[in-house]
């Protein structure tokens, strides 16, 4: 069984061994791998963010002027590959486009920014938690520093500034800077800086402090800390001052030189941001802000380091319990859905059955009505036929009478007698028709012409006449 | 993007250097080989100090342990401002028994334990700022200078361990071989390693780019290093 002797002793070396090259080895590894630095610029549109970036890095990052009419705050990251001597830098500049432009400067101004920062942390965390991971060539997109551009009003911070910085100070290193500092006079600037710092302190905003624990940089850093927030001026144009071409802004009343420390704090910003503390910014982001995010996220997901009995939890156990929980929930949900489905099917089935029954009833009902109607119509038809027959007989009888009356006035051949006999035989069943009544009928027919448009109509009128009692009397 | 003037990005290298020097380094090596091959002497020679206590001291009983044991000794050494916490793990009893079957098991277990310890620290919710690194960074394997071939024990051990740790094979007490014998021995060992697909440090898979590969190829030509250790000083010229 392994036995470990953990005494740590200081040992003096008898000669040069050579491991003093270790830092160089480490550094050269970073150099060949390249490393990334990510800056987030937050400030109103037109305050000079892009110009400042161009001035800081002595180059022209291709950006078009941002519009003032953005509907919401959105973050625009852009990555550039810079190289200086043998150092490769992957620089990402993230712009908060539309910040401070909305009419309603509420929560929605800040939350896209917070979301973006969190997303970068999340991506790193995901990579770190992977089983097969490759962290050494992972492109780190976590924001290492946030440059907050303060509008040079000369009075104090805006409430939007305070709210934003308060929300961001636990997630990212904030360096506040006063933009377009050439619009403030020296005395105003001094008061402005004091006001800003006191407001930040009284609101509990934790901005980035340049580290003072390392003797090499402690002095310069503590001096710089006292100059915060840096009042900067950016310019990519060059103006001839004396016999040199310097970057400056030319006004009718004079020239503001960017790299002149008595004109503005640009040089200080460059020193602090790039030449002295770039690595510290990266380290702080990783060891402080990222760890905080990671801890909160994992706790949120339900992982703990110790269980209620203060026994250390093995991550494997936690994973397994979580997995069981999850699977259990999944099963439950499946069951629920299946139940719901079955119920719905039953319901629909019942409904359909009900409807079917109703339809069937209706159908039966209609059938009965139809049969009823049919019967009635049949009856009516028979009646009508009877009446038609009756009418025909009457007609025949009337014609017989007519011919009889004509015969009475003139001698007729025997043939007609036969006809008469036939007709009278036909009309025998009916009531006899007297001469006088036939006259009445003819007269009536002449006096009351039938206004009938059709035969059917005519028959009906005749049937009415036949039914009319007074008319009938004439027959009897 | 083209930079039109000096920005000062390269200053970050110095920043990094200062930071690493402040935090210091940790280096853990393991020496494996039969007793009497000069392991402790070698380590002492490497670090120019009495890192390991030699097993054969006058007045001490020499005992071969019945099973492979692992003993770690930690020292803090400093050179030109660079602090290093050096841990040397010795494996007395390795290859010394009559039956050496599975003598590599305790070693493999130890290495994996260190990995496990590190992993545990890494997945804790509230992580330490600097996770103590006890993982074995390199394993120096001492091959006895027979001049013939790698023994089955050597092959087995290197095969298993090259999968989980950086193995640096060395020919111990190389002053017992003539130059020709040495060259032949190295050649045969290289062939053996290739035949058995044992990838020792520096592994070809991890060559980062062409320059790296060129440099490593030159090193690979010379593997295994034939070394001699001495901790006593003598006047030369």
Image (cartoon, coloured by chain):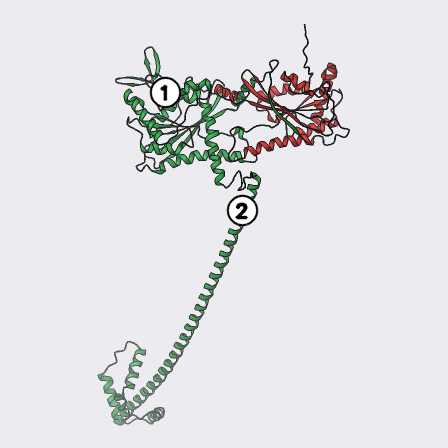
The chain that hosts pointer 1 is A
Q: Is residue A451 above or below residue B37?
A: below
Q: Colour of chain B?
A: red
Label 2 sits on a secondary structure element that is: helix
Residue A141 is at least partly visible in this image: no
Residue sitting farthest toward the left? A447
In the rendered structure, the answer to whether residue A323 lies left or right of residue A98 reads right
Residue A108 is at least partly visible in this image: yes
Which sits earlier in the primary sequence, circle 1 or circle 2? 1
Q: CA distance from mark 1 to mark 2?
A: 56 Å
Q: Are marks 1 and 2 in contact (CB under 8 Å)?
A: no
Nearer-the-camera pick, A11 or A460: A11
Q: Tell me the residue that label 2 is attached to.
A: A325
The chain that hosts pointer 2 is A
In the rendered structure, the answer to whether residue A327 lies left or right of residue B90 reads left
Give percent across and percent down for residue A467.
29, 86
In the rendered structure, the answer to whether residue A32 lies left or right of residue A48 reads right
Give percent across and percent down for residue B89.
65, 25
Q: Colour of chain A?
A: green
Q: Is residue A247 above or below residue A46?
A: above
Q: Tell me the residue that label 1 is attached to.
A: A266
Label 1 sits on a secondary structure element that is: helix
Q: Quadrant of residue B35?
A: top right
Give percent across and percent down for residue A331.
54, 50
């Amino acid at each position: 069984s392994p036995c470990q002797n953990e005494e740590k002793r200081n040992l003096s070396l008898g000669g040069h061994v050579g491991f003093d090259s270790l830092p160089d080895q480490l550094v050269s590894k970073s150099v060949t791998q390249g490393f990334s630095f990510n800056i987030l610029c937050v400030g109103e549109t037109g305050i000079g963010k892009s110009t400042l970036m161009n001035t800081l890095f002595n180059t022209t990052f291709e950006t078009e002027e941002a519009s003032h009419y953005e509907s919401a705050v959105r973050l625009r990251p852009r990555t550039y590959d810079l190289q200086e001597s043998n150092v490769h830098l992957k620089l990402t500049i993230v712009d908060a486009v539309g910040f401070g432009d909305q009419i309603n400067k509420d929560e929605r101004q800040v939350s896209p920014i917070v979301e973006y920062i969190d997303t970068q942390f999340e991506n790193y965390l995901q990579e770190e938690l992977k089983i097969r991971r490759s962290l050494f060539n992972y492109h780190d997109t976590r924001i290492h520093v946030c440059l907050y551009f303060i509008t040079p009003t000369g009075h104090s911070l805006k409430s939007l500034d305070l709210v934003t910085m308060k929300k961001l100070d636990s997630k990212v290193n904030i360096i506040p800077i006063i933009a377009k500092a050439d619009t403030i006079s020296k005395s105003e600037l001094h008061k402005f800086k004091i006001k800003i710092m006191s407001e930040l302190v009284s609101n509990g905003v934790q901005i980035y402090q340049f580290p003072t624990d390392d003797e090499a940089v402690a002095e310069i850093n503590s001096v710089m800390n006292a100059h915060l927030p840096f009042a900067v001026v950016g310019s990519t144009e060059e103006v001839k001052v004396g016999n040199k071409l310097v970057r400056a802004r030319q006004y009718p009343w004079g020239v503001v030189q960017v790299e002149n420390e008595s004109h503005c704090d640009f040089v200080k910003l460059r020193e602090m941001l790039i030449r002295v503390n770039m690595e510290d910014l990266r380290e702080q982001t990783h060891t402080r802000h990222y760890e905080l995010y990671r801890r909160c996220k994992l706790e949120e997901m339900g992982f703990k380091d110790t269980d209620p009995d203060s026994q250390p939890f093995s991550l494997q156990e936690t994973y397994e319990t979580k997995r069981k929980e999850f699977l259990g929930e999944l099963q439950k949900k499946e069951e629920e859905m299946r139940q719901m489905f079955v119920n719905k099917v039953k319901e629909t089935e019942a409904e359909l059955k009900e409807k079917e029954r109703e339809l069937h009833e209706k159908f039966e009902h209609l059938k009965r009505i139809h049969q009823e109607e049919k019967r009635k119509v049949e009856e009516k038809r028979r009646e009508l036929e009877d009446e038609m027959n009756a009418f025909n007989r009457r007609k025949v009888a009337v014609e017989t009478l007519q011919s009889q009356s004509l015969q009475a006035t003139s001698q007729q051949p025997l043939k007609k007698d036969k006809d008469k006999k036939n007709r009278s035989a036909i009309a025998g069943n009916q009531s006899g028709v007297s001469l006088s009544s036939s006259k009445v009928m003819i007269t009536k027919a002449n006096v009351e012409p039938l206004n009938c448009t059709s035969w059917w109509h005519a028959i009906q009128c005749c049937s009415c006449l036949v039914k009319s009692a007074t008319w009938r009397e004439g027959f009897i | 993007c083209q930079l039109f003037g000096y920005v000062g990005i390269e200053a970050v290298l110095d920043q990094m250097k200062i930071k690493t020097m402040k935090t210091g380094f940790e280096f853990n090596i393991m020496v494996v080989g039969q007793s009497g091959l000069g392991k402790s002497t070698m380590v002492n020679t490497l670090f120019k100090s009495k890192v390991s206590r030699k097993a054969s001291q006058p007045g001490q009983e020499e005992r071969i342990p019945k099973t492979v044991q692992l003993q770690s000794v930690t020292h803090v050494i400093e050179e030109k401002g660079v602090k290093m916490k050096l841990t040397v793990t010795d494996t007395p009893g390795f290859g010394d028994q009559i039956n050496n079957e599975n003598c590599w098991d305790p070693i493999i277990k130890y290495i994996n334990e260190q990995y496990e310890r590190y992993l545990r620290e890494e997945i804790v919710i509230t992580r330490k700022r600097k996770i103590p690194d006890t993982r074995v960074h390199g394993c120096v394997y001492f091959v006895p200078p027979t001049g013939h071939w790698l023994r089955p024990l050597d092959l087995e051990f290197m095969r298993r361990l090259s999968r989980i740790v950086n193995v640096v094979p060395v020919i111990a007490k190389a002053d017992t071989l003539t130059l020709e014998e040495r060259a032949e021995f190295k050649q045969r060992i290289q062939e053996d390693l290739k035949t058995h697909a044992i990838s020792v440090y520096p592994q070809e898979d991890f060559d980062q780019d062409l320059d790296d590969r060129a440099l490593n190829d030159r090193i690979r030509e010379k593997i295994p290093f034939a070394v001699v250790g001495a901790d006593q000083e003598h006047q030369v010229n």
